[in-house]
Image (cartoon, helix red, strand yellow):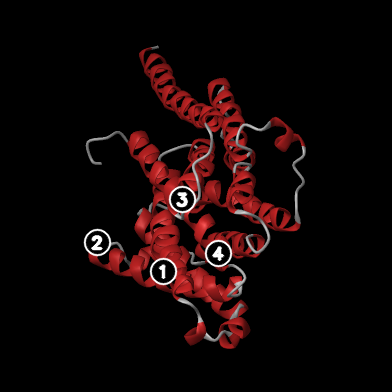
Amino acid sequence: MSRLSASAQGHLAMLCFSALVAGSFSLGAQVANEITPTALNAVRFALATVLVGALAWGRGDISRAGFVAPWRYFVLAGLFTLYFVLMFEGLKTAPPVAAAAVFTLVPIMAAGFAWILMRQIMTPRMALALAIGGAGALWVIFRGDLPALLAFDVGRGETIYFVGCISHALYTPMVRRLNRGESAVMFTFGTLLAGTVLLGLYGWQDIRATDWSALRPLVWITILYVAVFATAATVVLLQFAALRLPSAKVMAYTYLTPSWVILWEFGFGNALPGGMVWGGVLLTILALYLLLRDDSAEKTQNFKKMQI
């Protein structure tokens, strides 16, 4: 990735992010009623902390300077752990694709928080891309069925998860606001360590009450997946991208999540959707293309300003 520009690296990181996040919807929905959200997430954060900590140590990223103002990590961890706990709480009743629909509301909220915190302003092309991506995601979610879209009834699980998505949207611009030059791996380690402490304290009773030996293998597979891929890897990818791209662009990749969820569901034995749905997939690809074009337009404008 060293030969790619900083913005291209950010886009590639978020492409991987969207695919990995989608897996947690499909797996999480299958085990959400077998273990409490706080117990599951406490274990996932602990495992992820060990993994990322080992990576940070091996890279030589851990330093005393990295722990200056540790309150920053607890702020980020509070936002991130709240998102994950409410996600699994919502998945107790919300289907994976419906939850993915709620997740697509994150980009516009992230853009709003980015303006409030950092005065990041969306260009017209970026706003158009977000709108097209949102339309494409809804098309995928409701499988091209307009009556199904019009009859959409938000349930309790979706409402709970929406609160978590607000937290996720605020987390993204806060990464850039609170980072003081730490590497993405070091910053991720600090966030995960703080999250492990918060979840350990808040969810101690649930952790003690869980019969860990009685959990079926799929629960452990889910815990390992969300710890390694949907936590350690995605937090690194998200913070890596957030330091290279505007918040709205970072979260725009959530529009790909419903499409990835469909593929994950197919992998679990469910049928692929009909041809109409793939029109929505093309819209999300178009949205990402517009975002990439937006990068080029911004570079051209900046170059002209330098010439003047």
Tell me which amino acid carries mark 3. Answer: Trp
State the image coordinates of residue 96 (x, y, percent, origin top left). 58, 53
Vertical side of 141 occupied by 208: above or below = below
* Label annotation for residue 224: 1
- Image quadrant where residue 52 sits: bottom left
**Which mark sits nearer the N-terminus, 4 or 1?**
4
Question: Is disc 3 placed on a helix, strand or loop?
Answer: helix
Real-space Cα separation, disc 3 to disc 4, in angstroms: 13 Å
Q: Is residue 124 left or right of residue 47?
A: right
Question: Is disc 2 placed on a helix, strand or loop?
Answer: helix
Residue 293 can be seen in this image: yes
* Label annotation for residue 30: 4
**Which mark sits nearer the N-terminus, 3 or 2?**
2
Real-space Cα separation, disc 4 to disc 1, in angstroms: 14 Å
* Label annotation for residue 59: 2
Task: Residue under label 3, please give it.
Answer: 264
